[in-house]
Image: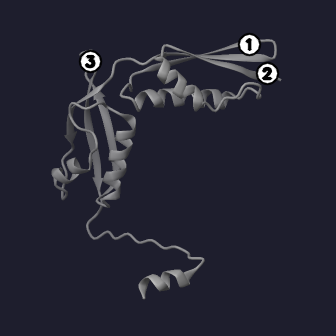
Amino acid sequence: RVRFGSLRLRGLSASWEEELRERSALSPGEPLSFPKVLAERDRVAGYLADRGHPLGRTDLTVAYSGDSAQVRLDVDPGPAVRVDSIRIDPLKRTQEEVVRRELTLKPGGLLLGRRVLESRQRLLDTGLFQRVRIVPEFADSGRPEADLRILLEERKSGWYGAGAGLLREPQKIARIFQ
């Protein structure tokens, strides 16, 4: 059985490499798991995107030596990408200002993966939209800038949402409302 031996990261700053190593799910001596190795590669790509490098490249190499495997990730972070403009597709009922208020990405700021997810969630949390897509569009100019296209599907008017829950200790809730 082949066991995981070591992880080498190349092409990153020392601080980024240290942070990634601390959070690695790969442990020396454990059986080699390709899903875990691929997840590690994807985690590195996500790490780059969360720091404004969504165009970064991560190449994976696995070298075998007897019953041990060395994993190497060659990383090219690529340029830091900034948001050039934000384009919101036309809406029927919702004003564009409502959408812009919920975005955590701004023109001139870094295109951060976590901010894309935060903005999407904030728009969904308004209850006004049933689908939200935030699509970075890269011009062929070679400049590290992206236009963001916001695609929204508004909920039908008259839509209502409700929720339910189960309490183990309803007497505590009764005290709150007394």
Q: Quick check: marks 1 and 2 in contact, CB under 8 Å?
A: yes
Determine whether 28 is above or below 124 in the image.
above
Identify which amino acid the numbered label 1 is placed on: Tyr
> Where's residue 104, x and y in %?
28, 43
> Where's residue 28, x and y in %?
73, 25
Residues 148 and 82: in front is 82
Image label count? 3
Classify residue 122 as left or right of residue 76.
Answer: left
What residue is disc 1 on?
A: 64
Determine whether 11 is above or below 157 in the image.
above
- C-alpha distance separating marks 1 and 2: 8 Å
Mark 1, mark 3: which one is toward the viewer? 1
Question: Residue 170's image quarter?
Answer: bottom right
What residue is disc 3 on?
A: 140
Residue drawn at x 35%, y 40% as measured from the top left: 116
Question: Residue 51's image quarter?
Answer: top left
Identify which amino acid the numbered label 2 is placed on: Val
* Extreme residue toward the right, this view: 1
Residues 5 and 96: in front is 5
Crowd tier of the residue under label 1, counting other residues whose Cα lies within 10 Å: few below 14, some 14–19, many 20 or above: some
Q: What element does badge 3 sit on?
A: loop
What residue is disc 2 on?
A: 2
Residue drawn at x 77%, y 28% as measured from the top left: 31
- C-alpha distance separating marks 1 and 3: 40 Å
Residue drawn at x 49%, y 81% as measured from the top left: 173
Q: Is residue 41 visible?
A: no
Q: What element does badge 2 sit on?
A: loop
> Where's residue 85, x and y in %?
19, 33
Identify which amino acid the numbered label 3 is placed on: Asp
Crowd tier of the residue under label 2, counting other residues whose Cα lies within 10 Å: few below 14, some 14–19, many 20 or above: some
- C-alpha distance separating marks 2 and 3: 44 Å
